[in-house]
């Protein structure tokens, strides 16, 4: 196993999850390669210490074994679902979580809606209350580290009805997170889509590519993201037995 640095970052390749996890080699990021496989250990990214992995299956198994010894068992491997299944089969004590989707989009521009605006610091407590009510499991949260900015939509009464965040974005791949709509006043009105479009358009302009993660059983979110133009790939995560949840 050989450790990569910013000077050898080209060896990371172009896989979107790897590029996202690398975070432009921000402080604390470590990356490794072995016989064509790559792994990036990224602390506290999207609510977890994650070990993004990509490449040929057999060297990836050896690489993840070595990388977990180096960075610690609390890091959760994440990557394409078939590769994660191979890792779990080849590494004792590694257990697979339910599959989900990574979705991404590239391009120079995306249409936006005048409904959405960027929230001011004064609006963030209200955004936090909406998220706690409608999406309490969100890793992105207005009152916690991770999000660069929040977009929101208000209805005709002035009530905040939908949110989306630019969170844990890498220089060359921005991440959309924290997407939610008020269950009584925001859903079915295009408010979440408007917030998403504002964030995604900004990410595409700044980074050239944008991505997100979504649960495999969230049919309404999948329809929304595919309507916007994001493409899906099935991914999975795993964790070591006994490691903190």
Image (spheres, helix red, strand yellow):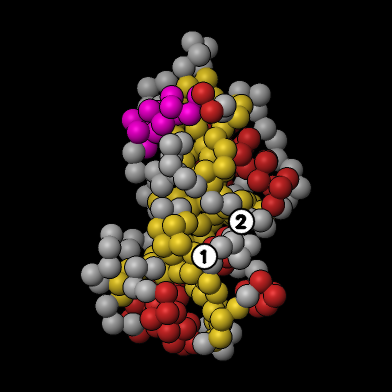
Image spot of residue 62 (x, y percent): 44, 87
Mark 2 lies on residue? 170
* 209 vs 47, nearest the viewer: 47
* Magenta portion: prevailing SS class: helix
- Which residue in the rendered view is the most extreme toward the left? 242
* 94 vs 72, nearest the viewer: 72
> Along the polypeptide, which appears first: circle 2 or circle 1?
1
Is 132 magenta? The answer is yes
Image spot of residue 238 (x, y percent): 35, 68
Which residue sits at x=56%, y=32%?
151
Mark 1 lies on residue? 28
Is residue 64 at all visible to an observer of this figure? no
Question: In this rendering, is residue 107 above or below 85?
Answer: above
Few, some or many C-alpha atoms within 10 Å of disc 1 (few <14, some 14-19, many ≥20)? few
Which residue sits at x=46%, y=62%?
43
Q: CA separation, marks 2 and 1?
A: 14 Å
Is residue 5 at all visible to an observer of this figure? yes
Q: Are marks 2 and 1 in contact (CB under 8 Å)?
A: no
Q: Quadrant of residue 138?
A: top left
Q: How many marks?
A: 2
Q: Secondary structure at mark 2?
A: loop
**Mark whose residue sits in front, 2 or 1:** 1
């Amino acid at each position: 196993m050989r450790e990569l640095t910013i000077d050898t970052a080209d060896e990371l390749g172009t896989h979107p999850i790897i590029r996202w996890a690398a975070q432009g080699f921000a402080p604390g990021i470590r990356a490794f390669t072995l016989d064509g496989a790559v792994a990036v250990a990224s602390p506290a990214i999207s609510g977890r210490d994650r070990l993004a992995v990509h490449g040929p299956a057999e060297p990836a198994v050896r690489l993840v074994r070595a990388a977990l010894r180096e960075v610690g068992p609390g890091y959760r491997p994440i990557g394409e679902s078939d590769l994660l299944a191979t890792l779990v089969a080849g590494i004792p004590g590694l257990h697979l979580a339910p599959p989900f989707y990574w979705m991404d989009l590239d391009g120079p521009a995306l249409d936006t809606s005048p409904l959405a605006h960027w929230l001011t610091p004064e609006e963030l407590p209200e955004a936090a209350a909406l998220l706690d009510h409608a999406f309490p499991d969100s890793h992105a949260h207005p009152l916690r580290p991770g999000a660069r900015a929040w977009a929101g939509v208000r209805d005709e009464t002035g009530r905040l009805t939908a949110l989306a965040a630019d969170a844990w974005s890498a220089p060359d791949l921005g991440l959309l997170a924290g997407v939610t709509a008020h269950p009584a006043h925001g859903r079915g009105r295009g408010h979440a889509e408007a917030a998403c479009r504002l964030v995604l358009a900004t990410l595409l302009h700044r980074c050239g590519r944008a991505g997100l993660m979504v649960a495999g059983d969230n049919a309404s979110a999948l329809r929304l993201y595919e309507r916007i133009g994001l493409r899906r790939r099935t991914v999975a995560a795993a964790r070591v037995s006994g490691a903190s949840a």
